[in-house]
Image: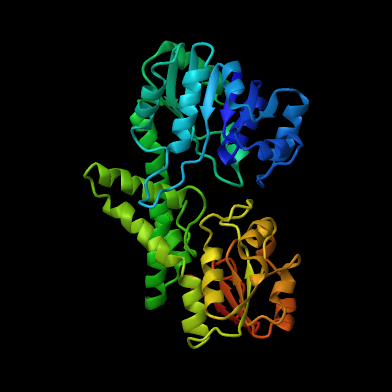
């Protein structure tokens, strides 16, 4: 099939490369000509394991190409995917200007009966909105809601081995045939395709992300309670997660969730509901708890370990991306920690395997970024683990002991809690754990 992927952000690049990998001819198009030039030259602007190799392979086999001619890509294709950004507005609602512009271009340039697939995360009613925009097109355009469920760091596996594929459309044989063929290579039995109406598909994405975010925020609240009563969040998590009705996923306490999806989608769901006269109190509280939790590491440093004064302290940070296996720093807890430390007069030295160029673009020379994680800890008054990259999970503690000015370890992911670090002479602190 000939497919145009409009938008070359995270969703567009991963989806475009994966659709090409399954035999389709895909044009990834974007109005950002400089970005397209870099992509055409083999430069992938995001870090996602396996994506660069997959893209290069499909470009070589002429199934994947990149173009700044959005109109031309639309005219050549029978399936057009909208994968543009929907950033939050000041009121929390999703900004749909880019979606509207793509829909308008499709209406003007489509050359045959086509399927227009909305892969961007959009609020309920967007499918109907896009239908109104393309209604006057010369050729019939079927509008489908097909939200993505790709986890950064594991996106290719998520696409190629999906838990489910949500498709929102009318009971239309043409659309069902096209979408079934499009996803046939990754769900041969079609059992994992969940067919529904567009509004339900739009809502499913927001509800799924909000429910997962809710679990995280609740466990972060429970972790604070654990610290007050002397309980251990690890043991609570194991006891609660062993209930098959609950399960063990997304029950880990930490410094708050970040990324491009959870924070934005929770707020957007609350905003959409409020516009319709519905108050989603649990979702709203989930966001409020997360905002508070992102300050937990700075509060522990200042009030628990440094008597309210961080001036002149050298704080080492391991992990800057919002999660491992990505260079994405959007809404990362590390950024709020850095902001607080700088405002309090502390010196910051940091390391991350992939995200340092993005952090450098934000902070410039205000923080020190080092190529060796142990260099960040040299002469540090505290080492804070924010992102649980594998290379941080079992470091050389003897080396840290000799290189740090003060042996204080603040473990934002509770990775080191069972290592007996206090017996080695460290001051150890985690999130809701007793440690050892």
Q: Is residue 27 visible?
A: yes
Vertical position of residue 256 compared to residue 152: above or below: below
In the rendered image, residue 320, in percent from the top left (x then y), is placed at 61, 62
Q: Is residue 224 above or below residue 304?
A: above
Decide which of 433, 343 is in the foreground and name it. 343
Residue displayed at 59% across by 32% down: 15
In depth, the one of 409 and 80 nearer the eye is 80
Q: Is residue 401 above or below residue 30?
A: below
The single residue placed furthest to the left in the displayed view is: 277
Location of residue 122 in the rendering, given as x and y in whole percent from the top left corner = 41, 37
State the image coordinates of residue 126 (x, y, percent, origin top left).
37, 32
Residue at coordinates 47% horizontally, 63% vertically from top-left? 253
Residue drawn at x 50%, y 81% is 302
Name the quarter where the C terminus is drawn. bottom right
Q: Quadrant of the N terminus?
A: top right
Q: Is residue 180 visible?
A: no
Identity of the residue drawn at 64% across and 51% down: 325
Q: On the picture, is 16 further left or further right than 398?
A: left
Give the quadrant of residue 367.
Answer: bottom right
Residue 284: which quarter of the image?
Answer: bottom left
Q: Quadrant of residue 356?
A: bottom right
Residue 321: x and y in percent read 60, 57
User: In front here: 146 or 141?
Assistant: 141
Q: Is residue 367 left or right of residue 88?
A: right
């Amino acid at each position: 099939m000939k497919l145009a992927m409009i938008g070359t952000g995270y969703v567009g690049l991963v989806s475009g490369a994966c659709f090409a990998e399954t035999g389709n001819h895909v044009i990834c198009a974007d109005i950002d000509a400089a970005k397209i030039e870099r992509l055409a030259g083999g430069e992938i602007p995001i870090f996602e394991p396996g994506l660069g190799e997959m893209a290069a392979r499909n470009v070589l086999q002429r199934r994947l190409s990149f173009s700044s001619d959005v109109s031309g890509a639309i005219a050549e294709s029978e399936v057009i995917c909208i994968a543009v950004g929907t950033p939050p507005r000041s009121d929390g609602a999703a900004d749909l200007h880019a979606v509207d512009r793509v829909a308008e271009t499709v209406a003007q340039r489509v050359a045959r009966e086509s399927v227009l697939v909305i892969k961007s995360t959009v609020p309920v009613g967007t499918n109907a909105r896009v239908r109104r925009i393309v209604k006057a097109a010369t050729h019939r355009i079927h509008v489908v809601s097909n939200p993505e469920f790709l986890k950064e760091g594991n996106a290719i596996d998520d696409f190629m081995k999906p838990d489910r594929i949500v498709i929102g459309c009318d009971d239309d044989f043409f659309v069902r045939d096209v979408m079934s063929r499009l996803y046939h290579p990754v769900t041969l039995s079609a059992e994992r395709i969940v067919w529904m109406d567009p509004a339900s598909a739009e809502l499913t994405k927001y509800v799924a992300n909000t429910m997962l975010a809710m679990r995280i925020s609740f466990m972060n609240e429970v972790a604070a309670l654990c610290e007050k009563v002397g309980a251990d969040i690890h043991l609570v998590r194991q006891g609660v997660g062993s209930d098959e009705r609950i399960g063990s996923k997304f029950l880990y306490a930490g410094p708050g969730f970040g990324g491009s999806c959870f924070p934005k989608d929770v707020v957007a769901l609350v905003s959409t509901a409020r516009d319709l006269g519905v108050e989603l109190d649990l979702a709203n509280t989930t966001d409020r708890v997360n905002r508070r939790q992102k300050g937990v590491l700075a509060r522990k440093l200042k009030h628990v370990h440094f008597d309210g004064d961080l001036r002149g302290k050298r704080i080492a940070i391991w992990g800057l991306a919002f999660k491992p296996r990505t260079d994405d720093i959007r809404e990362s807890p590390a950024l709020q920690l850095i902001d607080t430390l700088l405002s309090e007069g502390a010196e910051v030295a940091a390391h991350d395997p992939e995200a340092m160029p993005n952090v450098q673009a934000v902070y410039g020379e205000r923080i020190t970024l080092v190529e060796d994680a142990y260099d960040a800890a040299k002469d540090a008054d505290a080492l804070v683990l924010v992102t649980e990259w594998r290379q941080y999970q079992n470091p050389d503690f003897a080396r840290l002991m000799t290189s740090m000015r003060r042996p204080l370890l603040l473990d934002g992911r509770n990775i080191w809690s069972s290592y007996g670090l206090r017996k080695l002479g460290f001051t150890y602190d985690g999130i809701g754990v007793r440690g050892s």
